Amino acid sequence: MKKFLVIISIALLCATTGFAQKAKFGHVDYGALMKEMPGIDTAQQALLQYQQELEAVGKQMAEEFKTKQADYANLANSTTSSAILKVKEDELMKLYQRLQDFVSTSEVDLQKKQIELLQPFQEKLLAAIKKVAETNKYTYIFDVTMCAFHTDADDLTDAVRAELGIK
């Protein structure tokens, strides 16, 4: 049994040593490359504009809610009948629910818009990274921001930049 474990250990050591000698590692600065891609600034500006439009509608709805809430508080402090207060309270609750629904929906819509606008750039960048990896026979390419340590890896950012036609 001990001989079997020794043989297995030696086989695993040889296999991992052989893999490490054949494996080729590289890294890129994914974030920097994304920022440099032609057209990304236009997509980001469109995303910012969309976000600002959603925020403007949300602020308008919030102001309407505050106004109606103040009106309700004034009515509640007066001699208004309970039937009228109940109607106003129901209106206020419906408006509050609409506001909550809008916030939830707008968050999802903003995420969808971000994917719609940025995904083509991400796909193009990943295709360039893959092409550089295949051309130069790299086993792994990591994002430099995700690596804690990378002395034995080649920086392929410039190669990917050239593949994308970025100067």
Image: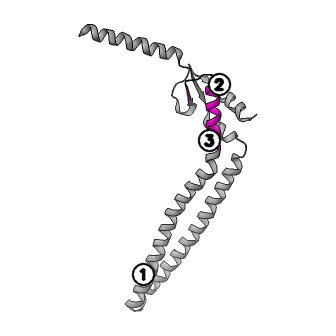
Question: 45 or 127: nearer the eye?
Answer: 127
Three-letter residue code for mark 3: Glu
Answer above or below: position of 143 versus 95: above
* Label 1 vs label 3, nearer the camera: 3
Q: Which SS does the magenta portion mostly show?
A: helix
Question: 73 or 84: nearer the eye?
Answer: 84
Magenta span contains residue 135: yes
Three-letter residue code for mark 2: Thr
> Looking at the image, is mark 1 or mark 3 earlier in the sequence?
1
Q: Secondary structure at mark 1?
A: helix
Disc 2 marks which residue?
135
Number of marks drawn: 3
Residue 167 appears at what percent x and percent y? Answer: 76, 34
Three-letter residue code for mark 1: Asp
| Numbered badge on residue 123 | 3
> Looking at the image, is mark 3 or mark 2 earlier in the sequence?
3
Disc 1 marks which residue?
90
Position of residue 76 in the picture relative to residue 45 (left or right): left
Mark 1–mark 3 CB contact (< 8 Å) = no
* Range of residues picked out in magenta: 121-141
Give the residue furthest to the right: 167
Which residue sits at x=41%, y=87%? 85
Mark 1–mark 2 CB contact (< 8 Å) = no
Position of residue 162 in the picture relative to residue 68 (left or right): right
Answer above or below: position of 88 versus 151: below
Give the position of the N terminus as an image quadrant.
top left
Which residue sits at x=70%, y=32%? 163
> Looking at the image, is mark 1 or mark 2 earlier in the sequence?
1
| Numbered badge on residue 158 | none
Q: Tell me if mark 3 has few (under 14), some (14-19) or many (20+) residues whose alpha carbon lies within 10 angstroms of its own.
A: few
Answer above or below: position of 3 versus 58: above
Magenta span contains residue 126: yes
